[in-house]
Amino acid sequence: MAEPTSTATGAVPSALSVEYIQAPPRTTEVPLHPLSCGVDWLALLLMVVIALWGGVVSYLRHLAKGAQFRIWFCIWHISSAGLSGFCVALLCQEKHISVPLTGVACAIAGHMGSELIKIFEYKIRGKAAGKDVA
């Protein structure tokens, strides 16, 4: 193959041309993010932490209203906040929503906690039964 003498015509200089590109060696290490399925696990972890924070704020508001502190209720409240934030973060990543807006949605989901899980359950049960759930 003859090399062109001028790069002005759009030809590639010989230093940049590569005949064969080798694939990187396969490893058994698990990448941190993003995975082949498209989930960014680092951003997802951050969103769950934001949702847990929303759950803590919600529980503190519950205590401020005069409720008595109970450890099991606290654990249940905060873990339901984490679950709802995790679900919202996955939905936001699936719909390609920006990270700041996902953070806001996860904070609100964490504050809602089990109420959001009830809403999801209602929607899923309605869809499964063939009802038109808005």
Image (tube, rainbow, N blue to C red):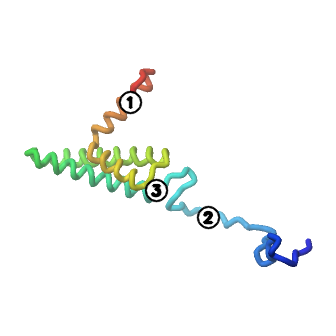
| Residue at the right extreme, as displayed | 2
Which mark identifies residue 69? none
Please, what is the three-letter code of the amino acid marked with disc 2? Answer: Thr
Please, what is the three-letter code of the amino acid marked with disc 3? Answer: Trp
Q: Which residue is mark 3?
A: 41
Residue at 84 percent of width and 77 percent of height: 6
Of the two numbered discs 3 and 2 in the rendering, the one whose residue sits closer to the viewer? 3
Q: Secondary structure at mark 1?
A: helix
Alpha carbon distance from label 1 to label 2:
42 Å
Rendered view: 129 above or below 9: above
Where is the N terminus found, in terms of image quarters? bottom right
Quick one: label 3 or label 1, which is nearer the N terminus? 3
Decide if residue 111 is on the left or right side of residue 62. right
List x then y, in percent, for residue 32. 50, 61
Q: Which residue is mark 1?
A: 123
| Residue at the left extreme, as displayed | 66
Decide if residue 103 is on the left or right side of residue 3. left
